[in-house]
Image (spheres, helix red, strand yellow):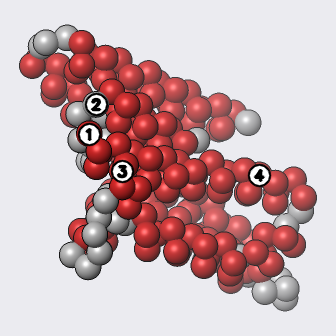
Amino acid sequence: ATGCSFFLRIVAVLTVINCVEIFFYFYLDDASVYSLVDLFDFAIEGNIPTFYSAVAILFCSALLALISYANWQRPDGDRFYWVGLAILFLFLAVDETVAIHEAVGDYFEQIFDASGFLYYMWVLPYGIATIVLGLIFLKFLWNLPRSTRTRFIEAGAIFVTGAIGMAMLGAREADLKGTDTVLYCVLYTIEELLEML
């Protein structure tokens, strides 16, 4: 619980700073705040919130790797699921750092019409991958102790709602009115907040 509250405090501080800098950006006509905006804005890659998210996800990957190691001698086969989760979270940490999803989106935009909820085309392959992985891990998830299973489902639902659901709402707003609107900023703030939670 202590570790959880530590992470929650960091998320709270980053969210407050993000909201304050958005207020400064829209309501104070002062170009000097733009460097602060770039440093803490949830929508910008390669800044402090991105670094925090990558480290937090990498921490999850390390914990999952430890669980994999601890379960390696068990004959029930769950060890491969734990290894799979550790690798998946390692990929997500790298993706958070170098924005693989945006490169994937750029590729798919050359093939499909990027508009509306699919204005950010990366949500299409990532959404399909989420469904496939959900089906692969369904039996594993069902076999977990009830409290652990419930927490996994809650955490996954919060993350996917932010990463894909809110990203699609933000994509529609960006397609209709551009990315320089208060609503777009609210949507990506909720998106990143849910991912960090």
- Mark 3 or mark 4: name the one nearer the start of the chain: 4
Residues marked 2 and 3 touching at CB (< 8 Å): no
Image location of residue 43, percent across then percent down:
31, 41
Which-is-in-front pick, marks 1 and 4?
1
Taking depth in this image into account, of 113 and 78 the one nearest to the observer is 113
Report how many numbered discs are placed on residues in the image. Answer: 4
Q: CA distance from mark 2 to mark 3?
A: 12 Å
How crowded is the residue under tag 1: few (<14 C-alpha within 10 Å), some, or many (20+)? few
Taking depth in this image into account, of 190 and 91 the one nearest to the observer is 190
Q: CA distance from mark 3 to mark 1?
A: 10 Å
Q: Quadrant of residue 16?
A: top left
Residues marked 2 and 1 touching at CB (< 8 Å): yes
Q: Which mark is residue 151?
A: 4
Q: Secondary structure at mark 2?
A: loop
Taking depth in this image into account, of 74 and 87 the one nearest to the observer is 87
Q: As shown in the figure, which amino acid type bears the numbered disc 4? A: Arg
How crowded is the residue under tag 4: few (<14 C-alpha within 10 Å), some, or many (20+)? few
Q: Which mark is residue 171?
A: 3
Q: Secondary structure at mark 4?
A: helix
Q: As shown in the figure, which amino acid type bears the numbered disc 2? A: Thr
Q: As shown in the figure, which amino acid type bears the numbered disc 3? A: Ala
- Mark 2 or mark 3: name the one nearer the start of the chain: 3
Q: Secondary structure at mark 1?
A: helix
**Quadrant location of the N terminus?**
top right
Q: Work out which residue is located at the far right of the displayed protein and give it.
A: 146
Q: Quadrant of residue 194?
A: top right
Q: Which residue is mark 1?
A: 177
Image location of residue 78, percent across then percent down:
77, 80
Q: Secondary structure at mark 3?
A: helix
Q: Which residue is mark 2?
A: 181
